[in-house]
C-alpha cells in the first residue's frame, strides 16, 4: 500500500470532521469520528450521488414501540439525493448491511492524514 497525503488532521477538526479530497483522481471523503479517521469514496452505491457531501448526523436506534431513541451522533452520513444512511465507521448501510460504501484505509502521522492505496 502506498500512502497518499489527503489533508491535515487539524483541517478535519476545523471543518466539522470532514474533508473531501482528490487522491489518484478519485474524490475521497475523509472523516474524523470519535478521534479515528475514515476514508470513503465519494460515490453512493445506490445511485452514484456524492455521498460524502451529505449531512453527518445520528439516527434512530432500535427501540420499543413508541420509543424513539436517538444515537450514533456524528457517525452517520445521509445521502444528499435519496437519504440512504451509512455508518461512517463501517461503511455499511443502516438497513441493508449487504450495501456498503467503498472505503480505503487511512493513517494519521503527526498532523498529516494519509489514504492508503495501491
Image: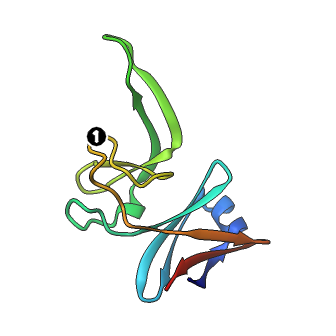
Q: Residue furthest front?
A: 1
Looking at the rendering, which quadrant does residue 108 occupy?
Answer: bottom right
Q: Residue furthest left?
A: 47
Above or below: residue 81 compared with residue 11: above
The answer to whether residue 8 is left or right of residue 56 is right
Give the class, few, some or many, for how many residues have Cα within 10 Å of label 1's Cα (few <14, many ≥20).
few
The answer to whether residue 44 is left or right of residue 37 is left
* Colouring chosen for the image of the structure: rainbow
The answer to whether residue 2 is left or right of residue 104 is right
Image point 24% across, 68% down: which residue? 48
The answer to whether residue 56 is left or right of residue 107 is left
x then y, percent, for residue 12: 64, 64
Looking at the rendering, which quadrant does residue 16 occupy?
Answer: bottom right
Image point 59% across, 69% down: which residue? 106
Q: Quadrant of the N terminus?
A: bottom right
Q: Secondary structure at mark 1?
A: loop
Q: Residue furthest bottom?
A: 24
Above or below: residue 15 compared with residue 63: below
Report the number of numbered marks. 1
Q: Residue furthest right?
A: 110
Above or below: residue 102 compared with residue 1: above
Above or below: residue 104 compared with residue 17: below
- Give the residue pinned by disc 1: 95
Front-most of residues 80 and 102: 102
x then y, percent, for residue 22: 48, 82
x then y, percent, for residue 110: 79, 72
Front-most of residues 25 and 3: 3
Image point 38% across, 18% down: which residue? 63
x then y, percent, for residue 74: 53, 44
Amino acid at each position: 500500500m502506498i500512502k497518499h497525503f489527503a489533508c491535515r488532521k487539524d483541517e478535519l477538526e476545523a471543518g466539522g470532521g470532514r474533508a473531501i479530497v482528490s487522491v489518484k483522481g478519485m474524490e475521497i471523503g475523509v472523516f474524523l469520528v470519535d478521534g479515528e479517521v475514515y476514508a470513503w469514496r465519494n460515490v453512493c452505491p445506490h445511485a452514484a450521488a456524492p455521498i460524502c457531501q451529505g449531512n453527518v448526523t445520528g439516527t434512530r436506534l432500535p427501540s420499543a414501540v413508541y420509543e424513539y431513541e436517538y444515537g450514533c451522533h456524528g457517525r452517520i452520513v445521509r445521502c444528499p439525493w435519496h437519504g440512504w444512511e451509512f455508518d461512517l465507521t463501517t461503511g455499511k448501510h443502516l438497513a441493508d448491511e449487504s450495501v456498503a460504501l467503498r472505503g480505503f484505509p487511512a493513517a494519521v502521522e503527526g498532523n498529516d492524514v494519509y489514504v492508503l492505496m495501491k
